[in-house]
Amino acid sequence: MAECPETRARAGLLHTPHGTIETPVFMPVGTQATVKGLTQRDLANDLNVQILLGNTYHLYLRPGHELIRQMGGLHRFMSWPNAILTDSGGFQVFSLSGLRKISESGVVFQSHLDGSRHSFTPESTVDIQLALGSDILMVLDECPEYPVRHEYARESMQRTVRWARQANSHFQNRMAESPTAHALFPIVQGSMFPDLRRECAAALVDLDAAGYAVGGLSVGEPRPLSLEAVEATADILPRAKPRYAMGVGMPAELPEYVARGIDMMDCVLPSRNARNGYLFTSEGRVIIKHARYRDDPGPLDPNCQCYTCRNYSRAYLRHLFQSGEILYAVLATRHNICRYLDIMRDIRHAIISSSFPEYLRCVRASFANAG
Amino acid sequence: MAECPETRARAGLLHTPHGTIETPVFMPVGTQATVKGLTQRDLANDLNVQILLGNTYHLYLRPGHELIRQMGGLHRFMSWPNAILTDSGGFQVFSLSGLRKISESGVVFQSHLDGSRHSFTPESTVDIQLALGSDILMVLDECPEYPVRHEYARESMQRTVRWARQANSHFQNRMAESPTAHALFPIVQGSMFPDLRRECAAALVDLDAAGYAVGGLSVGEPRPLSLEAVEATADILPRAKPRYAMGVGMPAELPEYVARGIDMMDCVLPSRNARNGYLFTSEGRVIIKHARYRDDPGPLDPNCQCYTCRNYSRAYLRHLFQSGEILYAVLATRHNICRYLDIMRDIRHAIISSSFPEYLRCVRASFANAG
């Protein structure tokens, strides 16, 4: 593992049954067994994506984890050759479901699709993720809204720790008879309270898990607080294990998380923003509907080697966006995901070549200028 | 040129400034400078598409032919290396526009986008298509609804012939000073009246055009009448010139048109039906939402070599369709277009290997069985 002594940044390798992943890594989000607008070939061959994120909540509801198990698991079902990490569904239950009721045993919720009633327990979400065949599973956690009172955040965090213990115990039992290898990551919660974050991390370290996630980010909190929440547990989580910051972040934030010891990130921003016409380039953002791009013959990002930038102009992308064409989403998503992956490769390279502090200064300066 | 003596089927080559096309050929429809859901790389490299159709009406309204000219023409604007045929916009004016008023000089119409008023003349539609840089242009024609009285059909057909003469004369003048080569096809009209079709074709032959289109099909008439309309002029149109049946047809109809002397066809069916969940396979149609495909691990079409069939199951495609995922449209369109191209390749091969009559009998028998 290459480390940056001035920060907590490190570059390493994460081994999974579906390939070895170079970290730090960004994981594109494949919510419903697809990264919206991209084929698996685009992802694996063109973009060299090593690991995808799948959403347990969505796949559980549709097409159902039992169907996916029957079809040979999620890798085979979606024809994805590389690694898959799944969340536990907790975040979606807390953000998408109408009715939801938390108890010590788990959470009862209504499907956002048809209002039907379901429940997740620490054990059942492990079982669902094993039915999916994920390489890396997440424990069921409660993800409180922001802001939340310290008292509730503590109560919730303590329940998340108890659930993590139950999930881990169930996972160990399942692994004892499993022919395939999997990893389960517990999730640090505690809202934006550093003391709760530290208490949570300390408790989870006892599980000696294969890796640790930092959850409860991107729930509406000011950006600096997300970074502080990650920083709070940086000295507590075991150095030898990968650390995953869930649901972050904007391009300028990626090296900030890495500088705080994060090895893995996922975010819907590159794909969702792409579809909404908001494109990330090495020269700043491009809002493609703007009239200035109407007759712009240049590539979206002159420094990008993605299929979109090598073949199409801003004028053409704007036309496709204005016309509501599917190809717009296809090309825009491909670029935005490529941009994120390029940033992660630059970060990794900077760490390995001992120039990460300088890289970080440049990024901060350029984003400060870009506004 | 290889010919089938028992039918009018023939296999040849059509030379354009953007490549030589093997005929008979099916042209995917790229209405708004994109075949919905496919990249230009998918089309040119994976599917080996030699010629695309673009819609003048749509491109004229958005992004505008002047912008496309400024961007270097439609090939460059959409990054398409092979040939492009454009229609004249007449069909869309008559089918999409709200208000429209036909006079001897042309047609005044309202945009379906914003209600703004525009006019097309025989000369202006040539100019617009030259601004787009099409390899093959169509003359402005009137495409009457079905059914229509013989008297109106005759009046309309005669106007279409006058417009074709005007368009051709204008086109010849423009070509005298053009650094690039283009071809203009007149369009045979006459509704479903064989006498009018013959009268129209005879008049258009005098223009000695590079090729001839048969229009006014797929306007709601019973299927056998479309074939009769094509047949009516088969002996009148010059044998040495390519013949293009506009806007047809279903898979089983493709060899029927070829058997009647047609060399070129275009149709939105493979792409539109794909998006609507209606898939064409070598074993018949697949309506992908049907519950029977829920856990079907097999490929959409076991005899198809397209990317979709080589990599994904019916169960996965059904899941994507039910979930409203973009990837569904991407994969389904790729397959349906591939199916049409495969049929055309089979037809061409059958003609060249002198087995077209047998091929046609097999197709008729299999579609009769499939219902």
Image (spheres, coloured by chain):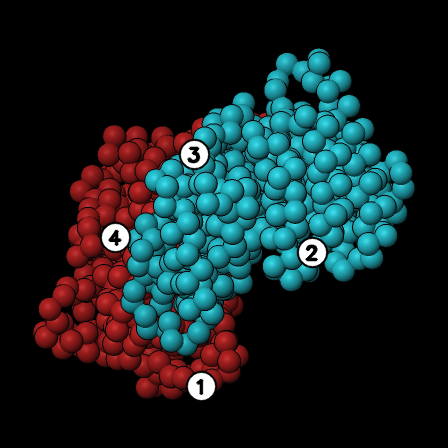
Chain colours: A cyan, B red
Chain ID of residue with mark 3:
A
Looking at the image, residue B290 sits to the left or right of residue B247; the answer is right
Furthest residue toward front: A6
Residue that numbered label 1 is attached to: B117
The Cα–Cα distance between marks 2 and 3, rounded to whole angstroms, is 32 Å
Chain ID of residue with mark 4:
B
Q: Note whether A143 is above or below A133 in the view shown.
A: below
Looking at marks 2 and 3 on the same chain, the residue that comes earlier in the sequence is marked by 3
Residue that numbered label 4 is attached to: B82
Q: Note whether A334 is above or below B105 in the view shown.
A: above
The Cα–Cα distance between marks 4 and 1, rounded to whole angstroms, is 33 Å
Q: The C terminus of chain B appears in which quarter of the rendering?
A: top right
Instruction: Give the total number of marks visible in the rendering.
Output: 4
Q: Quick one: SS at disc 3? A: strand
State the image quarter where residue B12 is shown: top left
Dot label at residue A2: 3
